Amino acid sequence: MGCLKLLIKIVIIVFAIIGFRATGCWDWCVKTFHLNEKPNQESMIEKSRDVADFSSIPDEYEIAKSANILGYRAVIAEHDATGQKFAVVNENKGLKLTKQDFKDGSLKKKIDGVNKKLEYQYIHVENFRILKQGTMKAMGQTVPYAQFQADVTNLPVKTLKGVIAVAQDDEGKSKILVSANEKGKYSQIIAEQFFKKVKLTQKEESDKPVKKSKSEKDRLQQDKEKITQTAQKAKNAIEDKIKTEKNAK
């Protein structure tokens, strides 16, 4: 249940407050998240490598924030022309969403339960509903997604529409993928164009164990044998010299 509570907070509340210039909230957002400072994309891409590889995203998309948000490691990006937002969030102990949740109905049950728990908070969502489910290309794999729509209370932005998806890294850990915009502006095409260009971060060559070729192994073994033989010959020569000196006495 905690994973969907976090998703709703990150995806809807953070997108609503940070992504849209809500009256009364904007000054706080600028101060807290330094939104007026245009980030250098090269440094942001490098900073985000622990979440994903964003080096191939098209120019019309821009990484806006790469940080721990509400205690969770996330990267938020934006489509310049439409203001559509994107998030890639690392799995941790408090955030687990799997591909199976999209297949067995767990996703809808979790969302309904979380919505009920959040209904008395000042900023919360109402009428969170799944519009449709399907698959799309993301991070070099085919991932399940659920397209949603939700009403947000006590903010100028009243309705959001978007998509939640989940990919897996090489260690089997989930990457939560989200895109959202105001109801009339959300585009599934824009979301899919972004996520299919996001890749899993590959380990640097220096981090990978170096495998010695068979010929190199053979050469090392031969060198070892030569050293052993040379040492043995030296030992035998010394023993013969000592024996000769003893006999001479």
Image: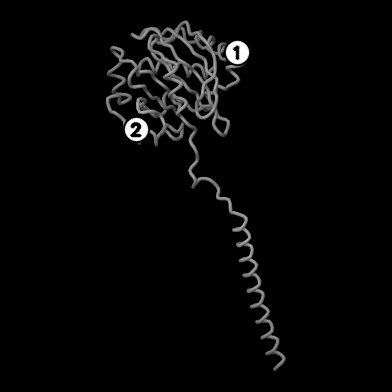
- Residue drawn 37% across the image and 33% down it: 44
Rendered view: 121 above or below 99: above
Residue depicted at x 58% and y 54% = 212
Which residue is drawn at the image coordinates 45% and 14% (left, top)?
Answer: 162
Q: Where's residue 67, x and y in %? A: 40, 29
The image quarter in which residue 75 lies = top left
Q: How many marks?
A: 2
Q: Badge 2, how many Cα within 10 Å: few under 14, some, many 20+?
A: some
Q: Tell whether label 2 touches label 1 (CB within 8 Å).
A: no
Image point 50% across, 26% down: which residue? 138
Nearer the N terminus, badge 1 or badge 2?
Answer: 2
Q: Amino acid at mark 1?
A: Gly
Query: Does residue 225 appear left or right of residue 154 in this picture?
Result: right
Q: Which residue sits furthest bottom?
A: 249
Q: Quadrant of the C terminus?
A: bottom right
Secondary-structure class at tag 1: loop
**What is the x, y in percent for residue 19?**
35, 18
Front residue of 19 and 8: 19
Q: Which residue is mark 2?
A: 41
- Say which mark, if any, is on residue 105: 1
